[in-house]
Structure formats: C-alpha cells, structure tokens
Amino acid sequence: MKVLFLTYDLPYPLISGGKIRAYHLIKNLAKNHQITLFSYYRDEEQKQYIPELKKYCQDIFLFKRRPPWSWQNIFRWMTRILPFPSATYYSQELEKALVKELKAGGYDLVHFESFYPALYLPLAKKLGAKTLMGNENVEYQIYNRFAERKFFFLKWFLKLEVLRMRCYEEKLWKQADINITLSKKDAEMVKKVTKKECPIIPNGVDIDSFKTIKPSGDGKTIIFVGTLIYQANSDAMKYFLKEIYPEIKRQTPRVKFILVSWYKPEWLEKYLIDSSIEFIQDKETPAGDFFAKADVLVAPMRIASGTRIKILEAMAAGLPVVTTSLGIEGIEAKEEVVIADEPEDFANEVVKLLGDKKRRQELGKAGRALVEKLYDWEKISQKLDKIYHA
C-alpha cells in the first residue's frame, strides 16, 4: 500500500514518546508499505536527522511550525476557527502540499499520527482519501486535568477551551474512516462517540535494545526519563520534587535522583541546588544507558492519557517501576509494577524498593517478561498492518 504518514514533529531523535512511537511504526510498516512522511519541525537543527528517516520513507516533506503564541495562531483561535492547540499546527504550506500530493500521489491511506496533524483530516476526506486517526492520547482529557489544577478564574477559562477541544476532537473521530488508540479506556471513549470499533495499537519497545541492560544494583539511585517540555512530565516532576522526594531523602539520606530531559525549564533551577539531584540534558543517548545507572524508575503521573513509553522501556530493561494508577493506564501490568497515588505512599514504596534488592530483581524480571510478551514493536506493527488492509 502507498501510505501518507503525518506526524506532529520529526520522529527522530527518539527523545519523546510520540517520536518513539511514530519512528517504530514507520520503521516496521515500511517492510510492507511505501511510506511518504509529512512532518512538522521546530528548528533547522532537526534536518540533520532526515537521513535516518530516509531509510524507511520514500519521500519526506517538512513544514516549519510557528511559535505557539504567534499572531497567526491567536487569530485563528480568537476567530473560533480552531481550538488553540490545533491552531498552532495550521500551515498554509502544508495544506497546499497535501492537496497537491493527494491529487497526484494515488495514496491508499492517509495516517494522521496524533490529534495535532489531524486538523487536515477533513481536507483529506474531501479529496477522497481513506483516513486513519492515530489517537496517541485523548487530548482534551489532558488539558482538562491540567485545568483542574489551576486557580478559579483560569480554571474556568481553560475549561471553556477544553469544551471546544472536545467538540473538535470528537468531530475528527467521527470523520475518520479508522480510529486507533493506545489503551482500552481510550478505545471505549472513541467507540461511544463514533459507534464503530476502535482497535487498540499500544505503545511498544524495541526489545533487542534493552536485553543486555542491567540496573545499577547499588540500592540508592532513582531515575525519571522524559522531556519536560511535555505538560504531563513537567507536572509529574513538580509534584515529585515538591511533595515526594523530600520524604524519600528523609528516610534514605544517601539517595540520588537522576532526571533526564532534553529540555531544561526555568522552574527546575531551584531544585538543582540539591546536590543529590543530577540533571542530564540529553537527546542522543539511548534510554537504556541511563537505566543502567539506576535502581528504580519513578513515574508519578497526574496528567496523562494513552500509555507511557518510558515505563515500558524501563520494564524491558529489568528496572522496577513505581508509578500512579494514571501512569500505568493502558499497560496490562498488575504485579509487575508498584502503584501508589498519595505522596507519602509513593515515597514509602520507593524507599522499600531501594532497600530490597530481591524485590527489585523480581519486579525487573516480571516486567521484562510482560513487555516481551505484549509490547514488542514488530508484533504491534503487524497488527496495524492488518488494520491498514481491512
């Protein structure tokens, strides 16, 4: 099949969940399909990664994304053409290129990987294309959870925007020929709106990349890996550093916390005064190299949808995970991870694991077995391949 694949950002290097997902889907689908990539990019530096993607894509078209608060984005939002998160992805250049490509290209399917590029789904439908919407998250839910944590006036202002997002997102679900989600919960939401089946294509792991990783074993190092430009990760780390980590330090004075992100926000500076916290700003090193330095991965997610790839990667590396009920959503894990939703409980579970090498090894072994069984990218892509042909 000839497939036009649209992503919200260049899917390389592998520095965020969305990039990892898009890259591995494209890599595996390219074995049986002819892929053309339409992708946004943020800066010129990203173009150096095009050769890696050309291994799997017949053609690549790039479109520069404007800064979020540009006047064009604000105009489209204020005139109620699009909800603000979608307005930031509007590109007249991309629109013209999409029309030209679909009229001349003979594509069998247009795959919109995530809510953001799906603003062009109605246009693709108008041009007669078969469309698939890859719902990496239910986006309005993420913004709604974020709004819940704001002060009264801002909360209700954001709630109105969330309502607009929900109406728009559900409209796109209805227009798509096929919807896929990452979790059962999200699939049920889409199915309720569209009255059609919604297959689950979960996130996965490149199993071979993690087979030789061995966690530290020193019993004193915890880690979080995830870009802090992403709202859910930023909220998780503010929560962890303010409400959880001080209690862990009180109980385990020798503890060390490694925080890895390619983006360094200003709010983080006040926490880095603490010598027990090591911040690593990196976008080239494989996650497994960092996992080998640690004993426990923490994922204290409070704003999320879809599934967290770094949790799956940590499990593949045999690194035990402490997360929240929301953090493990979409991953079929029960005894393979530790779940704690209150700050004190979360801290206590981390401390207990640091002091129990046998328990860490048991969790690591169980987590690796689960990922090998259910979350291998090659098997996941084979399932998506069947959906393409349906």
Image (spheres, rainbow, N blue to C red):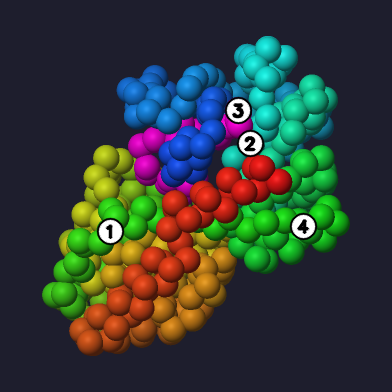
Q: Amino acid at mark 3?
A: Lys
Q: CA distance from mark 3 to mark 2?
A: 11 Å
The mark that comes first in sequence, 3 or 4, is 3
| Above-or-below relation of 65 to 281 | above
Q: CA distance from mark 3 to mark 1?
A: 32 Å
Q: Are marks 4 and 2 in contact (CB under 8 Å)?
A: no
Q: Is residue 159 left or right of residue 315?
A: right
Point 70% across, 60% down: residue: 187
Nearest to the observer: residue 115 or residue 386 = 386
| Above-or-below relation of 70 to 249 | above
Point 68% across, 29% down: residue: 108
Tell me where residue 32 appears, x and y as whole percent: 51, 37
Q: Which residues are magenta?
A: 1-22
Point 16% across, 74% down: residue: 217
Number of callouts: 4
| Residue bearing mark 3 | 2
Q: Amino acid at mark 4?
A: Glu
The image quarter in which residue 122 lies? top right
Q: CA distance from mark 4 to mark 1?
A: 34 Å
Q: Looking at the figure, which quarter contains the N terminus?
A: top right
Point 29% across, 64% down: residue: 317
Q: CA distance from mark 2 to mark 1?
A: 29 Å
Q: CA distance from mark 3 to mark 4?
A: 24 Å
| Residue bearing mark 2 | 111
| Residue bearing mark 4 | 197
Nearest to the observer: residue 74 or residue 191 = 191
Asked whether residue 261 appears in the rendered view, the answer is yes
Q: Is residue 302 left or right of residue 101?
A: left
> Which numbered dot is residue 210?
1
| Above-or-below relation of 21 to 300 | above
The mark that comes first in sequence, 4 or 1, is 4
